Amino acid sequence: MPKSKLLDYLNLLDKDAVAREAFAKDPQAAMTAYGLDAAEQQALLSGNQADIAKLVGVDVAALPLPQIGQTDYKPN
């Protein structure tokens, strides 16, 4: 399985206000433009930490809490 881009994207969202704004405005478009695949997008949109941890290859206990709540983003 190829390396997930999800961890890199999460780090980008943590550091880059422009990326956070783009995600807040249109999460699907922002994730697609970054190159996240459907599984990565679904995991992030669901907020399911176990799914996210599995994709990024870390133990769920090591995964920080999502900071998505700091935007206007509301999961489906």
Image (cartoon, helix red, strand yellow):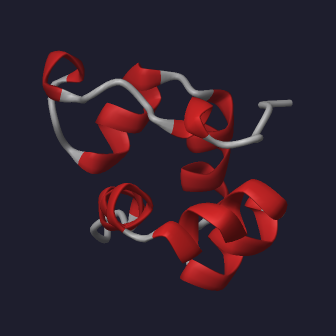
In the rendered view, tell whether residue 5 sits above or below residue 52.
below
Point 27% across, 68% down: residue: 3
Count of marks placed on residues: 0
In the rendered view, tell whether residue 59 sits above or below residue 35.
above
Quadrant placement of the C terminus:
top right
As drawn, which residue projects farthest toward the top? 61
Residue 12 is left or right of residue 74, and the answer is: left
Q: x, y (%) of residue 17? A: 50, 68
Q: Is residue 36 visible?
A: no
Q: x, y (%) of residue 2? A: 31, 71
Image quarter of residue 29: bottom right
Point 36% across, 45% down: residue: 55
Q: Is residue 53 visible?
A: yes
Image quarter of residue 73: top right
Quadrant placement of the N terminus:
bottom left
Toward the viewer: 29 or 36? 29
Point 31% across, 57% down: residue: 7
Toward the viewer: 31 or 17? 17
Point 45% across, 30% down: residue: 51
Image quarter of residue 26: bottom right
